[in-house]
Amino acid sequence: MKVSSSPHIRNSRTTQKIYLFVVIALVPAALAGIYFFGQKSLYIIFVTVISGMLFDLLMQRLFGVRLHFNCSALITSLLLALILPPTVPLWLPVIGVIFAIGIAKYPFGQGNNIFNPALVARVFLAVSFPVFMSSYVSPDTLTSASPLTVAKIDGYGTLVESFGLESSLYSALFVGNRSGSVGETCSFLIIAGGLFLVLVRVIDWRIPFFYLFSVACLALVLGSDVLFHLMAGGLLLGAFFMATDYVTSPITKKGRIIFAVGCGVLTVILRLYSSYPEGVAFSILLMNAATPLIDRFTVPRPFGR
Amino acid sequence: MFGKGVLLAEQKLSAASQIIRAPVPKRAIIPLQQHIGVMCEPLVKPGDIVKKYQLIGSAAGLSAPIHSSVSGKVAEVGMHPCAAGTVVLSVVIDVVEPEFVEPESRKSVDNLSVEQLLEIIKESGIVGMGGAAFPTHVKLKPKSPVDTLLINGAECEPFLTADHRLMLEHAEEIVLGILVELKVLGVQKAVVCIEDNKPDAISVMRNAIGDKNSISLAVLKTKYPQGAEKLLINTVLGKKVAHTTLPSDAGVVVSNVGTAKAIHDAVYLCRPLVERVVTVTGDSVEPKNLLVRIGTPIKELLRFCNASEYEKLLVGGPMMGVAQFSDEVPVTKSTTGIVAFKHCVDEPEQHCIRCGSCVEVCPYNLLPTVIAKASSRQNFLAAKLYHAEQCMECGCCAYSCPAKIPLVQHIRLAKLEIAKRK
C-alpha cells in the first residue's frame, strides 16, 4: 500500500503540456517569418533550436539534472530565433542560445533565473554584434530599416509616406509585410497565438492586457500613434510571450498588473526618448529585475484579515 | 469563493446507494481519543462485560464521553494504531451480540430545558460529524452572542456521499435535530447549506423543512472546498472570520447535518453516539454507504464491499484524507469515508516554475509556493511570516501544481515546526 501526503488526486496539467502549448502558439508566427523572409528564417529557426536543445542537454549533464527533453529550452531557443533579424549569419544565434541557456538560465538555478533568457541573449547579441543585429530587410529583400527605426530617425510622417497611406502602414503591420525580426512582423498571428494561450489558461490575461493597454494610453497621451506603437516592433511578441514567462514575472495578480504597466511605460519612454528605436527587450528585462520586489509588496491579505 | 478553490470531478459513485447496516465486527477497537480535546479516561478493564451504549470513556474538560458500540467482553485496553496515523489508547472488545433491545424513545422533548438538552448532548458523546469531531455541547454554548446557525450539507470532497444519503433518507430527523440546536443556542435563524450537485437532497430537505420560519435553505455552487467552515460562512452570510477567531465571534455556529441527526437520536431516541454513516468507495470496491458501529476495523468494511487489490487506502476524502498503512484501523466518530484506489500514480516531482497556479486557487489567499519553498529550506520563520499557520491543508494548491510538488506536505511540516517553536 502506498502512503503519501494529501491531496491524493491531481489535475492533468503538467509543465511539459504547458510548454507544448506555448510552442504551438508560436508556430504560426514562425511560419509567417518563413513565408515573408524565406529560407533564411527557416535555417535560423532550425539552427537555433537544434543547438539550443543540444546545449541544454550538455547543461543538464553539467548541473546534474536527469537527462530529458527540456521543452522550456525549446521555447527559449525558438523565441530567440524569432527576435533576430533574418539576415544574421548562422553562427550568431548559436552564440546567442549558448548565452541564453548557459548564462541567463542554469547558473541561477532551475526556476530561479531573474531575467528572461531569450531577451538577455538578444541584448547580449545586440551589444556584441551591433551591425549584424541591426541589418533588417523587408520581405522583398531590399535592405530597409524597420518601421520603428524609420519613425525614430526620419519621423512618423516619413514612415507613413513610404507606405503611401496610413491604412497601408497598418495593414502591413497587421499582416506582416514589413521589415522586422523573423517572428515579430505578423501581428495577427502573434495575437492569435497569444489569445490561444489566454484561452487555455497558460498565460495570465493581465500581463498582455495591461502591458498593451498602458502602451496605448501613454502613446496617446504623448501624441504618438497608438495602433502604430501596438503593432510595430516586438511589442506583441513581448507582451504575449516574453513578459508572460512564469519564472521571471510576479506570482500575484496585483503584482502582474504592476509588472505589465511598468513594462508598458518603459517601452514607450524608451521608444520615444532613448537612442534605441525599440524598448521592449530592455523594459521587460528591467521589470524582471523588479519582480522579486513587486512580489514582496503585493503579498495578498490572508482570508479574514 | 469566486475564483478560488478548484472544480473537481465529483466521483460520487455511491450517491444512489441506500444506507445499509454494516455487519457488526467480531472485534471492536474503540479509541479513547476520537475528538478534539482531552482524551477520555477508560472506565473498563480487561475481562469486564460491556453492553451496547455503555459508557466506557469518561470526559473531563474539553472532551466528549465515549460509549461502547457493541456488547461483549473487554479483551484489552492498550495502544492501537488509528486512522490519523498515530497510536492511541483504545478499548478492544470481543463482540458477543445478544438480542439487544434499543432504549425507549423519549416521551416528550418539548418540555426539556436548554440545560437539560445540553446535558443530553454532552452525555451522549456527540461531536461534530463532518470530520473535525469538536465536542458539540461546547460548540452549542458559545462564548460570544450568536444569531445564525449554519447546517453544513455541502460535502464538497469527491467520492463522499454520507451526508447526501443522510439528507435523502433522514431529512425529518435532521430537521428535528436542527430545531434542538436552535433551542439550545437561543437562535431563530438556521440555514441548511447544500451544494447544487445534490438536487434530490435539496428538494427532500426543502420538503422536510416545510414552512418553518426559523429554517431556510441555501443552494451553493459546487466547488471545492465550499464546505470549509469559514468559506461557508463567507459565501452564505458574507462574513469573514479571521484566523485567530472562531465563527461564534462572528455570531455564527456551523454544524454538520450528521451532527443534527446524532442530536436527534440522542434527544428523541435516547441513543448515545455509537455508530455513523461511512461511505466506502473507490475503483476497487463496490461503492456503498454503510451505517457502521464505531470501532469496526475498516478491513471488515472493505471485505463487505468486495474490495479487490488496491494500491492506496484513504480514510477521508481524496483531497484531505489520510493514507493508511494498515487496514486494521477502526472507524471512529470522525470517519466520513474510506476510499480504496486500485492504482496510485506517483507523478515525478519537478522544480517550481513559478506559474502561480497555487496562488490563484488558494481559498485563503496564501502563497503556497513561497511557504513550501521556505519550509523545504528549513526557514520556518519565513514560512510563519507568510502565514503558514492559516493554511487549512485543503489541497487545492498541490492539486493544481503542474510540477506536481507536494505543497501541502511542505506547508504541514512548516506548521508543525512553527507550533513546536511557540
Image (cartoon, coloured by chain):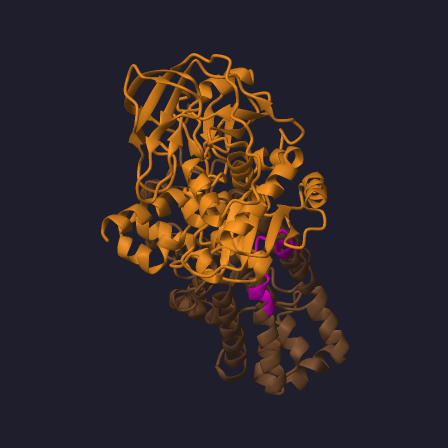
Chain colours: A brown, B orange
Q: Looking at the image, which is closer to me, B164 or B395?
A: B164
Name the residue rendered at 62%, 33% in the picture. B165
Residue A147 in which image quadrant: bottom right
What segment carries the magenta color? A196-209
Q: Position of residue A237 (x, y in %)?
A: 58, 63
Q: Is residue A46 above or below residue A270?
A: above
Query: What is the count of numbered marks?
Result: 0
Q: Position of residue B230 (x, y in %)?
A: 49, 54
Does the magenta segment cover residue A278? no
Residue A46 appearing in the image = no
The N terminus of chain B sits in image quarter: bottom right
Q: Looking at the image, which is closer to me, A73 or B414?
A: B414
Does the magenta segment cover residue A198? yes
Name the residue rendered at 44%, 49% in the picture. B139
Q: Looking at the image, which is closer to me, A180 or A72?
A: A72
Left or right: B318 as drawn, with respect to B190: left
Q: Is residue A23 above or below residue B161?
A: below
Left or right: B419 as drawn, with respect to B169: left
Q: Position of residue B15 (x, y in %)?
A: 64, 32
Q: Is residue B407 above or below residue A253?
A: above
Name the residue rendered at 62%, 43% in the picture. B175
Q: Looking at the image, which is closer to me, A119 or B220?
A: B220
Residue B346 in which image quadrant: top left
Q: Position of residue A155 (x, y in %)?
A: 62, 85
Residue B73 appearing in the image = yes
